[in-house]
Image: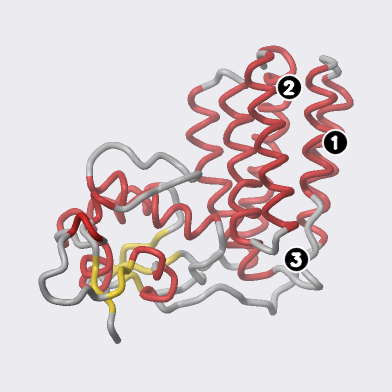
């Protein structure tokens, strides 16, 4: 393989979740995005050595990022056996979806009350970006944007604890879908998202909540116990971070 790792701090992070901050912030964001995009399969072993090589950082930084993800319930830290991507059981999946429904209802009601014109415009742009991603066949980006739509909606609700809880639930939901979704994997959330924004903009709480619950029903109806997608190959998942090996003497400025 003629691959060479670029130091993490130099990696471009266009169009995804927070990329600024410390190195463990950026590692966390990369792994979080990979989970949202369903590029990391449930049960994947997260080797500190492999991740350190991929991201060009120390194991200490990798451990800090994994610890944050474990706190959110999307990574399991196993004593003496290392970390793995969480693999929710059927019962755990049901509990997560039940909690997600309660949180989505509260967020929707609060968003109807508090969402600003600017926030609604941001939500509409996210839906457009989501639709564009699916239209060009970039399913991973579309799924991530769908999840980020719900995080942005939580911010519009102006309730910090709900934002934190929702971040964990959205990422866990993505794992559940990767593990249990069936059928052709067609996606129409952007239509449902647009209708939801319309109801919030009209300050119609009853309709907005009804649309959100219908949206959750649609996700739930596509699940079974058999399907598994995504990848357990860390180098494949983060291949966009790898740089082609340069010829000797070639400067970084010419990369």
Q: Quick one: label 1 or label 2, which is nearer the N terminus?
A: 2
Q: Tell which of 138 and 249 is nearer to you.
A: 249
Query: How far from the left and from the top, in percent, is residue 41?
Result: 51, 71
Marks 2 and 3, the one that precedes in the sequence: 2
Would you call the spot at circle 1 few (<14 residues within 10 Å), some (14-19), or many (20 or more)? many
- The reply to whether callout 2 and callout 3 are in contact (CB within 8 Å) is no
- Precedes in sequence: disc 1 or disc 3: 1
Q: Which residue is mark 3?
A: 223
Q: Which image quarter: residue 148? A: top right
The residue pinned by badge 1 equals: 211
Would residue 27 appear left or right of 100 to someone viewing this image? left
**Residue 109's disc number:** 2
Q: Nearer the viewer, residue 155 or 17?
A: 17
Asked whether disc 1 touches disc 2, contact meaning CB atoms under 8 Å apart, the reply is: no
Q: Residue at x 37, y 48 (%)?
A: 71
State how the image is colored.
Answer: secondary structure
**How crowded is the residue under tag 2: few (<14 C-alpha within 10 Å), some, or many (20+)?**
some
* Res 88 → quadrant: bottom right
**What SS does tag 2 mark?**
helix
Q: Secondary structure at mark 1?
A: helix
For this view, does 107 lie left or right of residue 247? Answer: right
Would you place residue 177 above or below residue 232 in this image? Answer: above
* Mark 1 to mark 2 CA distance (whole Å): 12 Å
Residue 223 lies left or right of residue 138; in this view the side is right
- The residue lying at 86 percent from left, 18 percent from top is 204
Q: How many marks?
A: 3
């Amino acid at each position: 393989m003629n691959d060479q790792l670029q130091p993490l701090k130099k990696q471009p992070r266009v169009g995804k979740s927070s990329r600024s901050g410390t190195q463990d912030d950026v590692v966390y964001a990369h792994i979080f995005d990979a989970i949202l995009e369903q590029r990391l399969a449930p049960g994947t072993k997260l080797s500190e050595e492999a991740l350190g090589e991929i991201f060009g950082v120390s194991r200490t930084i990798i451990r800090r990022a994994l610890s944050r993800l474990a706190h959110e319930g999307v990574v399991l830290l196993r004593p003496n056996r290392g970390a793995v991507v969480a693999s929710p059981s059927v019962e755990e999946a049901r509990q997560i979806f039940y909690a997600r429904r309660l949180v989505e209802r509260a967020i929707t009601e609060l968003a109807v009350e508090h969402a600003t014109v600017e926030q609604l415009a941001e939500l509409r742009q996210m839906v457009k970006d989501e639709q564009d991603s699916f239209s060009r066949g970039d399913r991973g980006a579309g799924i991530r944007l769908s999840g980020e739509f719900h995080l942005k909606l939580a911010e519009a609700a102006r309730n910090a604890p709900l934002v934190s809880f929702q971040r964990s639930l959205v990422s866990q939901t993505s794992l559940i879908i990767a593990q249990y979704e069936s059928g052709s994997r067609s996606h129409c959330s952007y239509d449902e998202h647009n209708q939801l924004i319309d109801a919030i903009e009209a300050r119609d709480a009853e309709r907005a909540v009804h649309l959100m619950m219908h949206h959750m029903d649609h996700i739930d109806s596509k699940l079974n116990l058999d399907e598994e997608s995504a990848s357990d190959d860390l180098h494949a998942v983060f291949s966009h971070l790898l740089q082609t090996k340069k010829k000797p003497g070639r400067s970084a400025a010419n990369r």
